Image (cartoon, grey):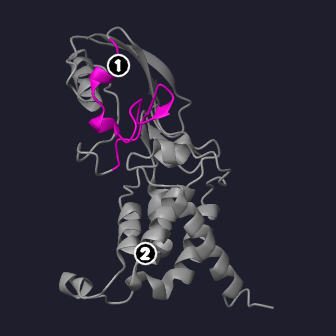
Amino acid sequence: MNFTLRVWRQKNAEDKGGFKEYKATKILADMSFLEMLDEVNNELVIKNEEPIAFESDCREGICGTCCQMIDGEAHGPESATTVCQLFMRSFKDGDTIVIEPWRAKAFPIMKDLVVDRSAFDSIIAAGGFITANVGGAQDANSILIPKPDADTAMDAAQCIGCGACVAACPNASAMLFVAAKVSHLAHMPQGKPEKAKRALAMVSKMDGLGFGNCRNHYECEAACPKEISVEHIAKMNREYGSAALFSKENPPA
């Protein structure tokens, strides 16, 4: 298979950047998208040209680092799929493929297809954790949790923090990411003591970092490789509203 790639190239955070065209030839249909980029980079290195910078780690759809817009879609045309798990058989021989980094104020481009997603780390540091000693696995197994709550918490916990929800949202909102973290812990008994503080802190940090507001487009859910439901946003909004109403800063009238 042969492809024409239109790839965003940007030397650093200050560079204006722009698209550059490359040929990807003799590509196997069973190659992953990143393996295809590896082949293109090998050719560039042989020609003494700068290889395309992109991130990857596990290449198993777990780490969330392979964040790319492919033909205008976060992670490409396949649903519930990361870039590393996207295979070239999803494209037609001779296709022109446009590859860009995430586009969001809170995710500044560092180089080529690499963006700085440390804003997510800051949101987690603001409250996405449990400070109390909850023991080990044997202690967790001794706590009875209703199955619906356990299932909902596990669904939210699947979030890998890739940022596809932000990239897909017209407002570059991080609501689905934050909601997954808030909802995950709010459904577990270990997370309930700090749920009000957590919701206030994480939402406040999200707003302060420049993410946009949710306008119910639901593009985040459609782009999420782990199919996190927007129902978690409703849960987060309830947690935040309750916390704001009864917080010390905003005591009830």
Q: Identify the residue at horizontal 31%, vertical 86% (top origin).
A: 144
Please give the residue where the numbered disc 2 appears in the rendered image. 185
Q: Identify the residue at horizontal 29%, vertical 87% (top origin).
A: 143
Please give the residue where the numbered disc 1 appears in the rendered image. 91
Residue 67 visible within the image: yes
Q: Which residue type carries mark 2?
A: Leu
Q: Is residue 184 left or right of residue 105?
A: left
Quarter of the image with the C terminus is bottom right
The chief SS type of the magenta part is loop
Q: Quadrant of residue 31?
A: top left
Which type of secondary structure does the marked residue at label 2 adopt? helix
Q: Residue furthest right?
A: 253
Graded by Cα atoms within 10 Å as few (under 14), some (14 to 19) or many (20 or more), the crowding at tag 1 reads some
Q: Which residue type carries mark 1?
A: Phe
Q: What stretch of residues is rendered in magenta?
A: 64-92
Q: Earlier in the sequence, mark 1 or mark 2?
A: 1
Q: Identify the residue at horizontal 44%, vertical 54% (top origin).
A: 228
Q: Residue furthest front?
A: 147
Quarter of the image with the N terminus is top left
Whether the magenta-drawn stretch holds residue 120 is answered as no
Q: Identify the residue at horizontal 41%, vertical 31% (top origin).
A: 76
Which type of secondary structure does the marked residue at label 1 adopt? loop
